[in-house]
Image (spheres, rainbow, N blue to C red):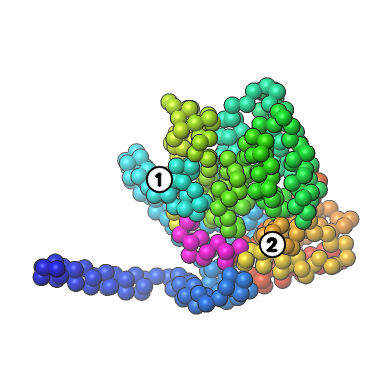
Amino acid sequence: MPEFDRRLFMKRAGLASATAFLTALTKPSWSRNLQAALHDAESLSPAELATEEDFWYYIQQAFTVSPSLINLNNGGVSPAPKTVQDAMKRYYDLANEAPSYYMWRVMDQGREPLRANLARMAGCDKEEIAMNRNTSEGLDTIIFGLPLKKGDEVVVCKQDYNHVCFSWKQRELRDGIKINWVDLKLPSEDENYLVKQYVDAFTPRTKVVNITHIINWNGQILPVRRIADEARKRGIEVIVDGAHSFAHFDFKIPDLGADYFATSLHKWMYAPIGSGMLYVRKEKIKHIYPLFGTDKPQDDNIRKFENLGTRPFYIEQAIGKAVEFNDMIGLERKAKRLHYLKNYWMAQVKDLPKVQLSTSLKPEWGCAIGMVAVEGKQLAEFDAFLFNNYKIHTTTINWEGVSGVRVTPNIYTTTKQLDILVEGITAFAKS
């Protein structure tokens, strides 16, 4: 290396070291503590780390959750960590300096790197990933974009998300397709039973099957791959509702055997509220009409599904920080912790008189989401009791045979908070 270049290199290296040092000094204490905790956790397996309360205390500090209530309704929408919140606010401020310039000429350039990062997490080609606002929008893109005709049949489960059922019913009403309904008895740990319900609903006229990866009402995980394999044997296309599975536990989308997969990134991904992702198998893209009009609706470019008009670029670009946050923790560690938290409270109440659980404690059949009811008691009364007496926020569910109070902790939830939940359930069951 010439002498001038060497001096320049050393000068730059010195500046980089100084910058790193100053950055370390200016980091908030929670960030420095989290970094140290992650370093210390390297020697522990995900299963061992799941029970280490000190480590997860530092994860909790990355969030700005309210100290005035215990939020156990993370299944609806999750709070974002500070880094994601700050990024969204920063991008919003930048956009408002000159919106048409910074949104369309600056921030829009960040979509392709973001697409690549999401594809890496999903385990697929970046040309199969589109960004939108939520699972419903992604699923509607497929439901209303599929070239189905009168007399074609689709298989849908009564326990699917209500908006999905509504969309299929609208397609049935408008186009004369026929829905063959699956009605599951949940919870279930019988894989053969679950698969058989779908297979029995298939007919020679079935074109599509809609499968929910993890049922939002009670957290039931379905054997998607086995159902998909049976569908593909019969030439049936597979739509997977991954609203609650993506970034909740570790899997790759192609391993599910899905042709189409939609998810909300503001749930278990911890991205800003109003962000979602759609996966379409490459060879299927050209056959799906986009939900919003475009000049080439039969193109095979995944970007045709992103033609939303003016969009909140500041939300979209902050998704990148959510990707980094999940990478930092690791999906296997995260899944083990979430499953541990669900089982922590369920194991303590499952044998109480009159207490009824509607979620499996086994990891292959459930993760973070749990459901509980008390025999002879109204759900609204149960929900109100927990909030009024313990400031615990949950939600009630009563949909197609699935009924109870849904309890959904998250990685910032502590076991001390779940001890309060157990106390509340116990008191209500005895009242």
Q: In which quadrant of the rendered view does residue 414 lie?
A: bottom right
Chief secondary structure of the magenta span?
helix
Question: Which region of the structure is painted magenta?
Answer: 322-335
Task: Relative to 181, say whether 314 is above or below.
Answer: below
Give left or right: position of 349 versus 51: right
For this orientation, the residue located farthest to the front is 233
Q: In which quadrant of the rendered view does residue 422 lie?
A: bottom right
Does the image show residue 168? no
202 vs 339, nearest the viewer: 202
377 vs 43, nearest the viewer: 43
Q: Position of residue 86 (x, y in %)?
A: 44, 57
* N-terminal label among 1 and 2: 1
Q: In which quadrant of the rendered view does residue 420 lie?
A: bottom right
For mark 2, what is the residue?
Answer: 363
x 49%, y 48%: residue = 124
Give left or right: position of 23 versus 47: left
How many residues crowd mark 2 within 10 Å: few (<14), some (14–19), many (20+)? some
